[in-house]
Image (spheres, rainbow, N blue to C red):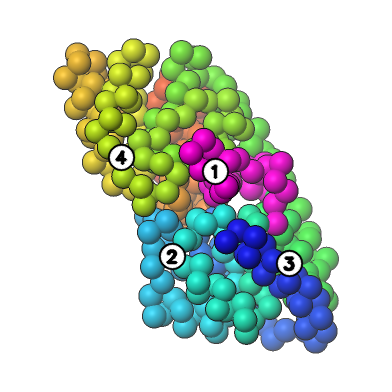
Amino acid sequence: MNKIILLLTTAALTWAAVLSAEPPRVPYTIVATTGMVADIARQVAGDRANVVGLLGEGVDPHLYKPTRNDVANILRADMIFYSGLMLEGRMTDSFVRASRRNPHVYAVTEQIDEAFLLEPPGFDGHWDPHVWMDVNAWSKAVGVITEALASYDPAHADAYRQNASAYLAQLAELDAYTKRVIGSIPEDQRVLITAHDAFNYFSRAYGIEVRGIQGISTDSEAGLDDINRLVDFLVDRRIQAIFVESSVSDKNVRALIEGARSRGHTVRIGGELFSDAMGAPGAYEGTYVGMIDHNATTIARALGGEAPERGLHGKLSPHE
């Protein structure tokens, strides 16, 4: 499936160059799946496009089935961007169908060099799709979207590249901040335990051990043995905090806390993290920068590190 999607994406880039001889009507319509993909498109396209995001706050892309309205938006779109690497597994057929009539359909992570991708144990033959958890790796998706826009609307290619350059500078600052605050966590507590295995790229980029109760896809179910192994780990390492996710049920996290308590060890919830979806639209946490700022700041503060309460630029929402 990944090879098919890669061929479709490559063909789209070639066709786009041929079919974009005349300037598009403005504003043209971009449909994007996750908030992280939509955010790049908005930052780079600026006011030349209306960006329609299909998956909103708290929506799990692994399990999401496109509605009739989603399919209509996909078929009407001038350009379509989705994350890829099987993240939107139940929507892939819709994108394949759309690509038959629209050459401007792009799986943005499929174009990222394999050097930036991870193939976790037990996921043989497939890449981990959660690339946005490494800010530097996710910056490569900015380049994919920028060049797609430049190909679709070549008269404004310089403007798209200037917008991308400004955005990439923000991402570089965010990457440095995340390294700094995660690096401030005492080494014996530098362990991130969450509801599902979405933080492998975060682990590699920022030097923190990660454990997910469920697998990479929330389609998988955690068994009793998985829970018991993590309870043993929590107790043995004396981990003080674990984390829930905004788009995943917290029932398994609660089971871990109860299991540790039965063994005489108290573990608290260190906060809610954004994994497969960003925060509320219009909020700082509803942007990619705000999402990662929130995660890094929340993790660092809960695990004994040093980070300002309101994050990188003091924009995080105050804790209730």
Residue nearest the observer in this picture, 132 or 228: 228
Disc 3 residue type (three-letter): Thr
Label 3: which secondary element = helix
Q: In this image, 172 relative to 311: left or right?
A: right
What is the quadrant of residue 182 in the picture? top right
Q: Which numbered circle lies on residue 90?
A: 2
Circle 3/circle 1 CB separation < 8 Å: no
Disc 1 residue type (three-letter): Asp
Q: In this figure, which residue is indicated by the disc labeled 3?
A: 10
Disc 4 versus disc 1: distance between alpha carbons? 19 Å
Of pointers 3 and 2, the one earlier in the residue sequence: 3
Disc 3 versus disc 1: distance between alpha carbons? 24 Å
Label 1: which secondary element = loop
Residue nearest the observer in this picture, 81 or 272: 81
Q: In this figure, which residue is indicated by the disc labeled 1?
A: 124
Of pointers 2 and 4, the one earlier in the residue sequence: 2
Q: Residue at x 68, y 42 (%)?
A: 116
In front: mark 4 or mark 1? Answer: 1
Q: In this figure, which residue is indicated by the disc labeled 4?
A: 222
Disc 3 versus disc 4: distance between alpha carbons? 37 Å
Label 4: which secondary element = loop
